[in-house]
Image (cartoon, rainbow, N blue to C red):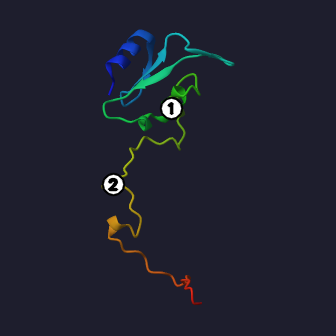
Amino acid sequence: MVTLGTLLHTRLHGRLVGKDSDGRAYYESRRPTRKTAGGERYERWVIYNKGEDGSAVPPEWWGWLHSMDDQPIPMEARKPWQLPHQPNLTGTPAAYRPPGSVYRGGQRAPATGDYDAWTPES
């Protein structure tokens, strides 16, 4: 959720660079915030939709947001391995439950016979 301070900082010091397909807004500071060996560096930030987490940033904006790219990657230039965002499903009914999990009935596959348990007397 965006606070009043974030909105004020964005209004006074930021310029809108673009929006992604889900409506997140990406901003950059109007003036450089620090100098580096490679030149001046601008502060960059994103205004999320209500209830989102930071992992929702799509790949085309992630590199730009972390100052790795000068411009966001166009959608046409996305690689096949750059998949759409999927939220973390841990703790939900859709979470991964491996065979033998208590949530899948707790029944493990029978042993294959290639294991001999150690006992102290042997």
Q: Residues within 10 Å of mark 1 (few under 14, many from 20)?
A: some
Q: Residues within 10 Å of mark 2 (few under 14, many from 20)?
A: few
Which residue position holds label 2? Answer: 94
The image quadrant of residue 9 is: top left
The amino acid marked with disc number 2 is: Ala
Is residue 62 or residue 19 the one in the foreground? 62
- Specify which label sits upstream in the sequence, 2 or 1: 1
Res 16 label: none
User: Is residue 91 placed above or below 39 in the rendered structure?
Assistant: below
User: Is residue 88 placed above or below 55 in the rendered structure?
Assistant: below
Q: Tell me which residue sits at (32%, 28%) in the image.
A: 1
Q: Position of residue 17 (x, y in %)?
A: 46, 18
Q: Position of residue 95 (x, y in %)?
A: 36, 55
User: Is residue 72 placed above or below 91 in the rendered structure?
Assistant: above
Q: Secondary structure at mark 1?
A: helix
User: Is residue 90 placed above or below 99 in the rendered structure?
Assistant: above
Res 62 label: 1
Q: CA distance from mark 2 to mark 1?
A: 26 Å
Quadrant for the C terminus in the image: bottom right
Q: Are marks 2 and 1 in contact (CB under 8 Å)?
A: no
Q: Tell me which residue sits at (40%, 70%) in the image.
A: 100
The amino acid marked with disc number 1 is: Trp
Q: Position of residue 41 (x, y in %)?
A: 59, 17
Q: Tell me which residue sits at (39%, 36%) in the image.
A: 53
Q: Tell me which residue sits at (38%, 44%) in the image.
A: 87
Q: Is residue 90 left or right of residue 42?
A: left
The image quadrant of residue 94 is: bottom left
Q: Secondary structure at mark 2?
A: loop
Is residue 46 or residue 3 the one in the foreground? 3
Q: Position of residue 105 (x, y in %)?
A: 32, 70
